[in-house]
Image (spheres, coloured by chain):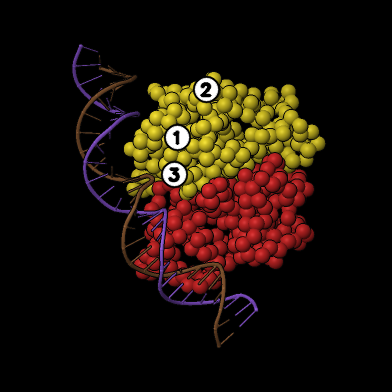
Chain colours: A yellow, B red, C brown, D purple
Amino acid sequence: MSLASLVRKLEQFVRLSAVDHAILSRASSERVRRFAPRVDIVREGEKPKDVHLILSGWACRYKQLEDGRRQVVSFFLPGDICDVNVFILREMDHSIGTITAVSTADLPREFFDEVAAQHPRIATALWWDTLVNAAIQREWTMNLGQRTALERTAHLLCEIWLRLRLAGLTKGDSCEFPLTQADLADATGLSKVHVNRTLQELRAAGLIVLKGRTLAVPDLDRLMQAGLFNPNYLHMDHEGRQLDAGIVDAAAG
Amino acid sequence: MSLASLVRKLEQFVRLSAVDHAILSRASSERVRRFAPRVDIVREGEKPKDVHLILSGWACRYKQLEDGRRQVVSFFLPGDICDVNVFILREMDHSIGTITAVSTADLPREFFDEVAAQHPRIATALWWDTLVNAAIQREWTMNLGQRTALERTAHLLCEIWLRLRLAGLTKGDSCEFPLTQADLADATGLSKVHVNRTLQELRAAGLIVLKGRTLAVPDLDRLMQAGLFNPNYLHMDHEGRQLDAGIVDAAAG
DNA sequence: TGTGCAATGTAACATGGGTTATTGAAGCCG
DNA sequence: CGGCTTCAATAACCCATGTTACATTGCACA
């Protein structure tokens, strides 16, 4: 429904022109689709046709083993783009499923061609987004490989919190939080039971208030400490506004 | 020393012209650097200046926590490029270190500008490489989150094996394998002791022959089964040769 | 041709987190 | 209002993997 989150995110990094805004606005209003909660948007094995921009709602990327073990490998929040240029590949190596009701805009190949050829600021911003997503994926590897259950859960909550805040989706110290404990288990590689134990521990320590579909983070710094969270990998300490057009254009490729 | 691995890898996906070859050849012969084993090429916190192409030797990307816990988040083999366009970011969120002696070619921003503007096949091939690397990182997330120690180790060995083969660095059923058990521990999120146990188990099952700096895989299919390995995420089942120039150029952006 | 250090191997013991099971609470729909 | 179904909570028990400690191998280099 809203492309505000995308624009807000990209403008963290690059100042977009009026034309850029118009291009993004057009792209996100054509080919809109709606999905119910808990359905697949794309399935592993399919040929990726378009790139999906999440306009509203939460989704996730996941992989599954034959015996049912399932790993959520990333979350998509409003404003997220599900892989610039995926249509280059022959088939999906993972699935994308919704968590809440979701609306998407399908971005066709032509959109990226046009951006690359004529809108270098958007192109640069999309590269930045791509690089940040790669960094997030690496951080998840770190998270699963080295952090304890408590650290890991705290870390994930910090990440989601900061990404939501960047997208303009937090209000004061709280936000909507539609993930179930099963979702958190699939994302952290922990069992549901242990996620529950871990959340209790975070609650007891006063680090989170999680009830119903609402999460509050009374003291982000303390939660970050608990999760050994270093926000550098989100690359939000942009110099966006300082980047002069010359540099931006040069990087746009 | 050799750009053969890179060309071989990219040509999996796209047929390169004589000019394309020349461009790559030039880029990989200017600005060559050599590194000793076990040193850092770039450190977390530094400003990424160039993109590194690995000409020879093995390296890895790693992240470290203050208390010393260390996670290898990816391996770089000959022909690998360490992040197209990283110089867009303000600072590195991880380090890159050598495992063996390594030689690299530094690819400056201008190289990518030129490729984007004038060599669409290379540009497409680099996008493909970028997407495959993202897929590998997701698979590592899956590996750490869901697979048991045995599966995880077998899976990693399969991946390395296939990537080496693609780069033309296997001979029959064996290859050079310079990783120590400590390296494997850092990459799999297991302790050194347990990596040792796990390798013993793989050896006992006849799935690998690992001695000195040489790995042999007598029966890849069985190793793949043990690792629940599905090679789809490497996207080697390309249709490279079937892609006509029109499609390739369109995708190049 | 030893000597030193890094890498590998192994044993004994400890524990974080998994598994299974059950209960209760909270929606949702007929 | 009542009956399903999903989610959360909690308890009891168990095992895969971590930890510590030490022995062995092997290679680089004096």
Q: Are marks 3 and 1 on the same chain?
A: yes
Distance between the Cα atoms at labels 3 and 1?
Answer: 27 Å
Classify mark 1: residues with Cα within 10 Å, few (<14), some (14-19) or many (20+).
Answer: many
Distance between the Cα atoms at labels 3 and 2?
Answer: 25 Å
Can the viewer see residue A103 in this picture?
A: no
Residue drawn at 61 percent across, 62 percent down? B38
Mark 1 chain: A
Name the one closer to the observer, C22 or A99. Answer: C22
Q: Is residue B171 above or below residue A136?
A: below
Distance between the Cα atoms at labels 2 and 1?
Answer: 28 Å
Q: Are marks 3 and 2 on the same chain?
A: yes
Classify mark 2: residues with Cα within 10 Å, few (<14), some (14-19) or many (20+).
Answer: some
| Position of residue B140 measured from the top left corner of the image (x, y, whole percent) | 49, 50
Circle 2: residue type: Asp
| Residue A148 badge | 3
- The answer to whether the residue labelled 3 contacts the one labelled 1, judged by CB atoms less than 8 Å apart, is no
Q: Earlier in the sequence, mark 2 or mark 1?
A: 1
Q: Earlier in the sequence, mark 3 or mark 2?
A: 3
Q: Nearer the viewer, mark 2 or mark 1?
A: 2
Residue identifier under label 2: A173
Q: Secondary structure at mark 2?
A: loop
| Position of residue A211 measured from the top left corner of the image (x, y, whole percent) | 40, 23
Where is the N terminus of chain B found, in terms of image quarters? bottom right
Q: Secondary structure at mark 3?
A: loop
| Residue A97 badge | 1
